[in-house]
Image: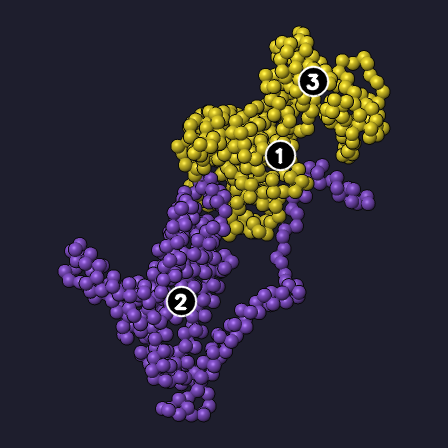
Chain colours: A yellow, B purple
Amino acid sequence: MARVDLDQISFSVGATKILQDVSLNVTNGEFLALLGPSGCGKTTTLRCIAGFVTPTSGNVRINGESVVNLRPNRRNVGLVFQDYALFPHMTVRQNIAYGLERRNISKADIDKRANEMVSIVRMEGYEKRRPNELSGGQRQRVALARALVIKPDVLLLDEPLGALDRLLREQMQIELKRIHRELEITTIIVTHDQEEALSLADRIAVMFDGRIVEIGSPSILYEQPENRDVMSFLGTSNIYAGSVIAAGKGEITVECDGFSVQARTTQVSSVGNRTYIGIRPEHIRISITPINDEPNVVHGWVETTVYKGTHLEIYVRTSADVGFLARASDASLTEAGKAAVGDPVYMTFDSNHVLVFEGEA
Amino acid sequence: MAGAATEATMPGSAGVPDLHGPAPKRQRYSGNRLLMILCLLLPLLGFMAVFYAAPFIYLTQESFRSWEGEDVAQVEPTLDYYIKTFTSSRTSRAFVRTFRISLISTIIALIICYPVALLLIRAGPKVRAGMLLVIFISLASSLIVRNYGWLVVLADQGPVNQLLVALGITKRGLRMVYSEGATIVALIHYIMPFVILPIYGSLLRIPDSYGEASVSLGAGPWMTLRKIIFPLSMPGVFGGTILSFAICMSAFVTPLMLGSPATAMMSQVAAEQLLVQQNFPKGSAIVVILTVSTFLVVVAYGVIVRRVMKVDV
């Protein structure tokens, strides 16, 4: 258990900058996700903490002490690889005991701790199996046990669920949460799967092009992202460019292509500013009868509808050829379900749900 | 229908998830597959039958026959020549010598070649290409030429002796050629590519993450090599050493050029019986003994590696 601090880490290979001024503070017992598209530097960041990559500049501290000059085997870090990296010539038990045997621990203690860990990951009865005799989920458990048994200061997970199928992935997410809760260990997970990050982490750090662009709790990042790229990366969204045509106290009106939108914002804005606005599909209500008494109404025609089981996706196109995606999941909105392709519809949304990204246009 | 529905919804919502899905099973070959494998092996099997099995069967038959002077007496099969091979001090010592030379050459070659293979893995692409080129060049050059090279290098007035004298290690040049030692040196040189390449191949197949996992669990580089990398490279070590051992066991030209009649290996003794003495049954018996004993060593080695190292080879 420990806190982990990255102070302005940069890393480059030749002229290619892989990490640029990455700073991160992970508190004791926190579960943090590094989320981003592949090649954004999230794995490199993880490897900086593990010690396999030495940053070109900046500092890595575990519990306040700099570890940049410490070799990976001297850092007390638990690492779970995407391919699990279980030693194929060793049994489950030998794999788990490997890290303990590298330390000055008595045989009895090794036995005790290894057994304890086997039961934490619920692999009793499988101790004598070899990795190739295990299913993907079981291998994942063993890899986790092997990393956790050494009581690391921090647990690092590199796309640990990437190789599992969807159902197993969801089960392992629950397991990971349970184990994290039981052991209260500082955990950093690298993932490109936003759903995984949203459901596992206390906080998410979103990375693009070697930088952390935004850090926050899953709900803040999803509902009120400050960065337009973060909004479009997390979930689906409608994002439009426009310019401010009226700016009042805490409220602005943005003129987009063929429609205007009222939005609440804390940012100070003046008329004429270029800006982007974003609306989540689930915040758009669809009506087949005209609405006049609401500030944000956009008229369009249903282009196509997609039934997704838990909700209905409605693609709407306006007369200015702007596409909207709306999502209707509420039973009361079956009205949206009545809309056939080609029907005129009216889309409304609350000005609280319109996000404004200024200064990026 | 109802069953399918509950199955689809249950595991996801489970506080008690199904942790242990089915473990992968070992694949069994079906009849059709077996036939296909047989077809693919047919050219090789045909070639081996004509050029290896048939002559060997012929030699084996020959080895049980009796031979007196010019005439081959048509008598009952006899084990005489097998007994003679082991009782005659010349052949029995050659037999032991052949094993000794092969074993020493293989062990030393392994000690030299394993670090080379590790270096190949760690090296950058340019260094790696250069090293592989050197290895292949040494494979491509004629064995005779290389042995002459060693004759020159190890000669009484050769560069090695000049160096030894210059360093004051000896007063006069040492007699190094025409000895068991010279044979071993040349054999090691000959078998090095056969040891390096299989080890390099099996090291290539070990994912970097294995080594990194070991290091992250607190093992130093040496411990990682000993506990993870070396055991996992055993298929290559096994392949390389078995190949070079077999090559050494059947060595003929190298001991002929760099050794002396007093350091003759089994192939030389067999050739002498077959080509000079024209004692075909005796020569055949020696060949059969050499072949069978080499084969037994290979099998025993394989079994030991499987049992002790617990690695599939």
SS assignment at label 3: loop
Q: Please, what is the three-letter code of the amino acid marked with disc 2?
A: Ile
Inspect the image, locate mark 1, and give the three-letter code of the amino acid beneath it. Asp
Tell me if residue B290 comes above or below residue A68 in the rendering: below
- Between disc 1 and disc 3, the foreground one is 3
Q: Which residue is mark 3?
A: A256
> Mark 1 near mark 3, Cβ–Cβ under 8 Å?
no
User: Which disc number belongs to residue A193?
Assistant: 1
Relative depth, front residue between B294 and B244: B244
Residue A26 placement (x, y as % from top left): 52, 26
Q: Give residue B47's position: percent from left, percent from top.
A: 52, 72
Residue under pointer 2: B247
Q: Image point 42% across, 30% down: which residue?
A: A56
Secondary structure category for the residue under label 2: helix
Q: In this view of the protein, which residue sits in the foreground, A154 or B42?
A: B42
- Sequence order check, earlier mark of 1 and 3: 1
